[in-house]
Image: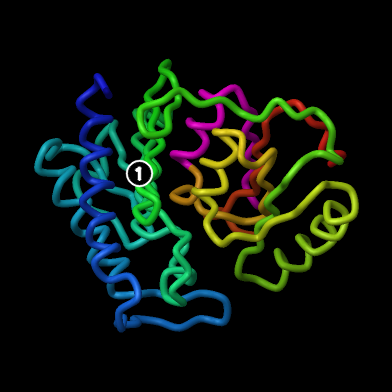
Amino acid sequence: MPTHPYLQAAIAAARSAGALLREHFGQTLEVNEFHAHDIKLDLDVRAQDLITAQLLAQFPDHAIYGEEGLAGNQASDFQWIVDPIDGTVNFFYGIPHFCISIALRERGEIIVGVIYDPMRDELWAVERGGVATLNGQPIAVSTRTQLADATLSVGFSKSKTTISAGLPLLEKYVMRARKCRLMGSAALDLAYVACGRLDAYIEQSVSLWDVAAGKLLVEAAGGQFEMTPREDNSDKISVVASSGRIDLEL
């Protein structure tokens, strides 16, 4: 059981949002915006509002930094980083592979991470200095050591530049790894790396809310997480997360 009230709060908020998403999965959904490679749902906003209300009710002086906007005291040392639906396109198309991601950072350091897949009722949780868990059981990254035995996720983001940069990587790993997957949820990819289902996750351009909780999970589970700010977009980062046991030949 989580011992820190911050982790308890994150788990409770993720489960509440997960119940909301399950209730609406497969139903007719209100779309706020259609983009070339993305969709913004009214439910994204509702889920973040629910998470925000629960967290700020307990910690009213904290900040919220989420995909759907800011809330709370933005001068606070404590900032909750929230992705209310990571995998919105999957959700919209009725593909049951999406999650809620909630992290907390204190003065820039991530101290709590929770990723919840409400369709499989799988909850990954970790606090700084603690053990990474899946549904309360300790997890660890894969022990595979050969690229030929590995399963990798190569993510593609929403611009021509990053898609063009990702295609050569995908071609390379399709030829050299056992399998490549493009599953549509960065946070779940990281959770899968943390528990050994995937050996690595590579993406050219993601937002902090996509990966903050997963970073702490992967590192606590024994893996490696590298992120590099993108020179062409200060709001985006490039990510390589892995077990650390395989030469990815980057």
Is 98 located above or below residue 2 in the figure? below
Q: Residue furthest left?
A: 57
Seen at 57% across and 82% down, the residue is 36
Q: Residue at x 88, y 54 (%)?
A: 172
Question: How dense is the environment of label 1, judged by Cα within 10 Å: few (below 14), some, or many (20 and up)?
Answer: many
Say which residue appears at 29% left-offset and 31% top-offset.
77
- What's the colour scheme? rainbow
Residue 64 drawn at (x, y percent): 27, 47
Compared across the picture, whether 122 is left or right of 72 comes to right
Q: Quadrant of residue 240?
A: top right
Q: Quadrant of residue 239?
A: top right
Q: Kindly give the residue lying farthest to the front in the view shown.
A: 120
Q: Nearer the viewer, residue 163 or 171?
A: 171
- Name the one closer to the observer, 241 or 1: 1
- The quadrant the C terminus occupies is top right
> In screen coordinates, is 71 left or right of 218?
left
Q: Position of residue 103 (x, y in %)?
A: 37, 39
Compared across the picture, whether 125 is left or right of 148 comes to left
Left or right of 241? Residue 169 is: right
Front residue of 161/9: it is 9
Label 1 sits on residue: 102
For residue 42: magenta? no
Tell me the kind of residue under disc 1: Ile
Q: Position of residue 183 (x, y in %)?
A: 59, 60
> The N terminus lies in which quarter of the figure?
top left
**Residue 221 in magenta?**
yes
- Residue for point 75% across, 29% down: 144
Q: Position of residue 218 (x, y in %)?
A: 55, 31
Span colored in magenta:
212-231
Name the element at disc 1.
Answer: strand
Please give the count of numbered marks on the rendered protein: 1
